[in-house]
Structure formats: structure tokens, C-alpha cells
């Protein structure tokens, strides 16, 4: 059995790596290597694959994969700004507005279109001011990239028109859901919408999107087993579980991620409570020696003693909740696998300490790098920088081709596959760069003069980008301050409309508009200052709250009105 041997080697390696401290000059040098990595892949896509969705790096051409809308360009747009390239960001943003059309007869993944396209356009819209683009009046509550994101999301809404509210997995962007579409979809395909859809609703003032995401979450929550677990695939019509393996990896992962990140972005205690309930049973039934296994959702018995590469997001999620001890130990387990192969195989047998048959590939996934970024931010331990450097060197050595970076078909002999997923530029490169740039504005770094925040709203009354960005599961950063700005502005406009409407209505015998005659709760209806039987009216307009500029944003936590 190889796992204990790997663990012993890892402890030695980590103690050695921890002794190394990276200077700012060394970190800057690694950032330059990562920047070169990005442009090698990005320019190869533009020269050989655009306008197709993805680059094929072995044959130097392109292919459509997820919907035929230049997916890599949308996914990589905000990474351009992360690297500081405002000029190319502006050019590509304009190009996408002119060339991308979502009114096409294409079957698209609801999940992938949401996280990559809707998420990518939302992020680019929220970063447009920092990129130096000309902004519409009222930005971030309006703008062409926001309208593109809304258009794409509306194409997904027919998938949510089900008795349960849980969406189908695939939708035709022109015709809606096919009558022959399977009702079986994965758990993540139901529960990974609250970030993008709530952001859309709060930026545009249309509650349709957030309502759809919350209805799906509510329906999924009700399908838990008696011991509190959810399975891997569910029939959205019958609401019966088709695959009953419970874990934190493929098919489930981003559901848990969105409960935590949704709670932070929306200041939603209910979402956090849901995750806490899941986390309790996950720790009880699936965690063994800081690995997370797959178990039967009704019995809790182990079904697959394997580690999946998609599970590597978990230490980062733990760090967001303050569970650093558990996060560090689990990260060490995953890092041991990376050191064994130079990457994370899709499946790894924990009991045998080796890859699982036909799951030996590594498509340059970002999850372990993402966790390293969060853990370095939380601990300052340069072990995570050493891992980041290992990742850069592994990818350069194993996956680089003359036309980009290729997915690794088999980590045992480093055979390559003719595909470069769009998430390589959207996530893998971005998280690597941010790992080595702790002063980046997305971390809340910089000073006022260097553009650490900016004004927004109708008359510049909102402060945006002051820290606390939330990354969706495709690494697209969303700014909670922008959501607050637009939702508060919409609320105030609605209050003014209500006042004007009430003034235009005939008054009742009490002298108040008839619209205000409805009964109030008993606790609010009587007052010693009123005559017996007279009811107290609601104030027509609430007092303005503190502007967002006066609130705090610390370590990703935005403090809002009710905090």
C-alpha cells in the first residue's frame, strides 16, 4: 500500500518546503512566468481556434464544445484584467458584443453555460470600470455586458420550468427543453446557480433569476436522506435519487461551494445553515484520515474509497469557514498525490495509492491551486507558494505544446489529449497568478490611489471593488458591493413609485390613501398616541441607510445593514 509511504514523504517535503521563503522579487518572477503561460495559450487560441469554443492544441485548430459562442474568449476575459491588460480587455469586450449571439439552435449545458458564460459576462461587466471602458449612466446597474449575461441566462430559464423547480441538464437556446430530454441530472446541476442568478436579479432588479435558483435549492434540500446526505444524480420530475453515492466530488462539489459563497455574497444565514448541516454529516460519514470517501446516501457505508480531483476545492472552502486545521491536513493529502504524478488524476485509489483504471487523466484542473490560494491568504505559509511553483513547472514540462497547453490523457506516461478546456485560462492560470500576487485588488490589496475601489450607481453614491470579491466556481469574481448598490437603488425607486401612486389614489375616510388601509400586524396596530381603533400607518419612505462606502469589507466578509 503506497498511501502511507506517500504521506511520510510528504511530511518531509512539506517541512523542507516550509523552510523556503519567497521574496517579493521571486514572486514577481513567478508571476511573469504565469503571465507568459497565459499569453502562449491565449494567443494560440486567437490565432488557431477563434471563433470556436476551444483550442485543440495538438492539431492547432478549434472545436465547439459547450454551445458555439467563443467560450474560451468569454471565459478568459476577466483574466486579461487580472493580468493588467486593459487594452485587450476592451477590445475583446467590444468584439463579443458584436459577434456573440445566444439566439441559436444549439443544445447547451445549463450548468456549464451558467458558470462559464453568464458568470464570465457578469464578472467582465463588474470589472469594466476598472478596465477603463466607457460606462453607461447608472453602471453597474446597467451596461452591454450585463445585458448579454441577462440574455444568456434567460435562454436557460425554460429548463427551470418543472414541477419541482429543479432544472433539466440541457436546454436548446432557441427552442427550450426538448420533449425527449432526460429528467436525470447531477446534484451540482441543480444547486449551482445562486451566485450568478442572484447577482443578475440584484443588478437588474428582475427577481426571476434569483427566485428560480432559490426554488431549485429548496427542492434539492427536501430530498436529503434520513441521515442528511444527498446523492449524485436525481430525477428532477419524480425527485427520486438515481445515483445514491454521496461525497464532495464530481457531480456534487459546486452545490456545497455555492451554499457557502452564496451565504457570504448575499449575507444569507439560511444558506450557511444548510451547509453547516451538510458539513456535519459529511465529516461524520465520509471523512477518514482527512480524506473524503464516497458513501451510500441512506446508510453511510463506503461505496468508493477514491479521491477525485474535483474534490480538491474542499480545503479552500474549509478555510473560508475558519477550519484551517482540517483544511491544511486535507491539502497535504492532495499535495502528496500531485507530487506522485505531477498533477491530480481524475480518480485516485486511496487504499492502493495509485490511479483508477480509465481515470488517469489530468485536464489541467484548477481546484488544488484554488485551495492553495485561499490557504496562503489565510496562513501566510510559503508551503503553498512552493506548491504553486511546482504546479507551474509541472504544467510547463508536461502539457506545453507549440499551440498551447494540452490536457494530460494519462499521468502515468504523460500522454496528451487534443483539448485545452476554457477553464485553463479562466481558472488555472488566474488562481496561479493570484496565489503569487497577495496585493492584487481582487484580494482587497492596493491603495486608494492605485485603484483599489471605484464609484458606481446613479450619482456615484456607491463604492465598489473595495475587497471581498466572491469567485464563482469558474473563478469569475463577483462584487457584493455592486449587488448591494443596485438592489438598494431599486428599492428606493420602488418606494418613490409607491409614494407617487398613493398620492394619486383617492383618500379614505381616515384621510389616508386607500392603499394604506390594509390591516397591520396586531403588534404594530395600536399606540397610546392614537385614538382607540385608529391604526398606525407605515412610513412611506424608509430613512436612507448608511452608504456602502461607510461599511467594512474585511477578508472577504462584507458587513451589511443587518450584520
Image (cartoon, rainbow, N blue to C red):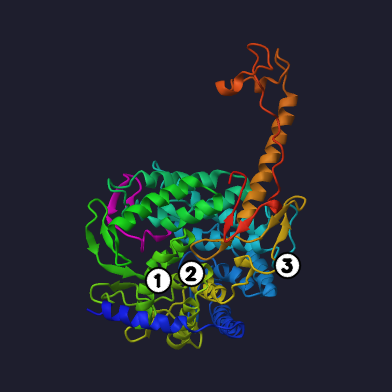
The residue tagged 2 is: 375
* Label 2 or label 3, whichever comes before in sequence order: 3
**Badge 2 local density, few (<14 within 10 Å), some, or many (20+)?**
many
**Badge 3 local density, few (<14 within 10 Å), some, or many (20+)?**
few
194 sits left or right of 235 in the view: right
In the image, which residues are magenta?
233-254
Q: Nearer the viewer, mark 2 or mark 3?
A: 2
**Badge 1 local density, few (<14 within 10 Å), some, or many (20+)?**
many
Q: Residue visible at 45% across and 58% down? A: 257
Residue 43 % position (x, y): 58, 81
Residue 74 % position (x, y): 57, 67
Q: Quadrant of residue 95?
A: bottom right
Q: Residue visible at 23% across and 76% down? A: 352
Image vertical order of residue 190 relative to residue 23, above or below: above
The residue tagged 1 is: 331
Query: Circle 1 — which element?
Result: helix
Q: Nearer the viewer, mark 3 or mark 1?
A: 1
Q: Nearer the viewer, residue 258 or 328?
A: 328
Which mark is drawn over residue 132?
Answer: 3
Q: Is residue 291 magenta?
A: no
Q: Is residue 245 magenta?
A: yes
Image vertical order of residue 381 relative to residue 313, above or below: below
> Farthest residue toward the right?
459
Amino acid at each position: 500500500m503506497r498511501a502511507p509511504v506517500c504521506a511520510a514523504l510528504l511530511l518531509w517535503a512539506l517541512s523542507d518546503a516550509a523552510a523556503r521563503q519567497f521574496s517579493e522579487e521571486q514572486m514577481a518572477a513567478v508571476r511573469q512566468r504565469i503571465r507568459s503561460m497565459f499569453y502562449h495559450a491565449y494567443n494560440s487560441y486567437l490565432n488557431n481556434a477563434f471563433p470556436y469554443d476551444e483550442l485543440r492544441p495538438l492539431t492547432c485548430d478549434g472545436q465547439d464544445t459547450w454551445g458555439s459562442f467563443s467560450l474560451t474568449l468569454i471565459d478568459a476575459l476577466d483574466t486579461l484584467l487580472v493580468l493588467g491588460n486593459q487594452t485587450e480587455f476592451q477590445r475583446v469586450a467590444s468584439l463579443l458584443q458584436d459577434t456573440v449571439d445566444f439566439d441559436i439552435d444549439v443544445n447547451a449545458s445549463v450548468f456549464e453555460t451558467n458558470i462559464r458564460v453568464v458568470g464570465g459576462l457578469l464578472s467582465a461587466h463588474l470589472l469594466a470600470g476598472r478596465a477603463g471602458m466607457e460606462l453607461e449612466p447608472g453602471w453597474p446597474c446597467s451596461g452591454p455586458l450585463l445585458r448579454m449575461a441577462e440574455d444568456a441566462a434567460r435562454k436557460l430559464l425554460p429548463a427551470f420550468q418543472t414541477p419541482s423547480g429543479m432544472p433539466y441538464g440541457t436546454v436548446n437556446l432557441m427552442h427550450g427543453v426538448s420533449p425527449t430530454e432526460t429528467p436525470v441530472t447531477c446534484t451540482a446541476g441543480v444547486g449551482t446557480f445562486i451566485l450568478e442568478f442572484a447577482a443578475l436579479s440584484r443588478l437588474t432588479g428582475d427577481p426571476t433569476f434569483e427566485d428560480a435558483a432559490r426554488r431549485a435549492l429548496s427542492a434539492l434540500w427536501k430530498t436529503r436522506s434520513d441521515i442528511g446526505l444527498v446523492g449524485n444524480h436525481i430525477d428532477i420530475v419524480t425527485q427520486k435519487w438515481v445515483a445514491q453515492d454521496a461525497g464532495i466530488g464530481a457531480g456534487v462539489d459546486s452545490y456545497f461551494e455555492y451554499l457557502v459563497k452564496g451565504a457570504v455574497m448575499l449575507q444569507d444565514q439560511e444558506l450557511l445553515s444548510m451547509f453547516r448541516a451538510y458539513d456535519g454529516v459529511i465529516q461524520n460519514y465520509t471523512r477518514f484520515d482527512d480524506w473524503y470517501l464516497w458513501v451510500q446516501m441512506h446508510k453511510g457505508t463506503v461505496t468508493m474509497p477514491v479521491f477525485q480531483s474535483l474534490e480538491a476545492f474542499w480545503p479552500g472552502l474549509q478555510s473560508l469557514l475558519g477550519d484551517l486545521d482540517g483544511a491544511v491536513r486535507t491539502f497535504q493529502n492532495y499535495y502528496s498525490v500531485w507530487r506522485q504524478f505531477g498533477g491530480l488524476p481524475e480518480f485516485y485509489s486511496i487504499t492502493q495509492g495509485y490511479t483508477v483504471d480509465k481515470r488517469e487523466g489530468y485536464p489541467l484542473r484548477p481546484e488544488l491551486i484554488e485551495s492553495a490560494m485561499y490557504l496562503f491568504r489565510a496562513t501566510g505559509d510559503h508551503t503553498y507558494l512552493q506548491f504553486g511553483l511546482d504546479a507551474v513547472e509541472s504544467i510547463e514540462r508536461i502539457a506545453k505544446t507549440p499551440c498551447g497547453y494540452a490536457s494530460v490523457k494519462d499521468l502515468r506516461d504523460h500522454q496528451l489529449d487534443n483539448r485545452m478546456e476554457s477553464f485553463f485560462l479562466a481558472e488555472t492560470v488566474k488562481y496561479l497568478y493570484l496565489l503569487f500576487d497577495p496585493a492584487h485588488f481582487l484580494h482587497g490589496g492596493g491603495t486608494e490611489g492605485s485603484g483599489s475601489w471605484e464609484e458606481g450607481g446613479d450619482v456615484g453614491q456607491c463604492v465598489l471593488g473595495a475587497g471581498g470579491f466572491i469567485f464563482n466556481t469558474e473563478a469569475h469574481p463577483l462584487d457584493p458591493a455592486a449587488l448591494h448598490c443596485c438592489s438598494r437603488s431599486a428599492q428606493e425607486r420602488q418606494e418613490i413609485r409607491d409614494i407617487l401612486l398613493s398620492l394619486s389614489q383617492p383618500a379614505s375616510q381616515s384621510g389616508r390613501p386607500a392603499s394604506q388601509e390594509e390591516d397591520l400586524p396586531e403588534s404594530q396596530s395600536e399606540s397610546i398616541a392614537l385614538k382607540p381603533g385608529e391604526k398606525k400607518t407605515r412610513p412611506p419612505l424608509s430613512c436612507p441607510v448608511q452608504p456602502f462606502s461607510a461599511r467594512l469589507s474585511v477578508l472577504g466578509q462584507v458587513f451589511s445593514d443587518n450584520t
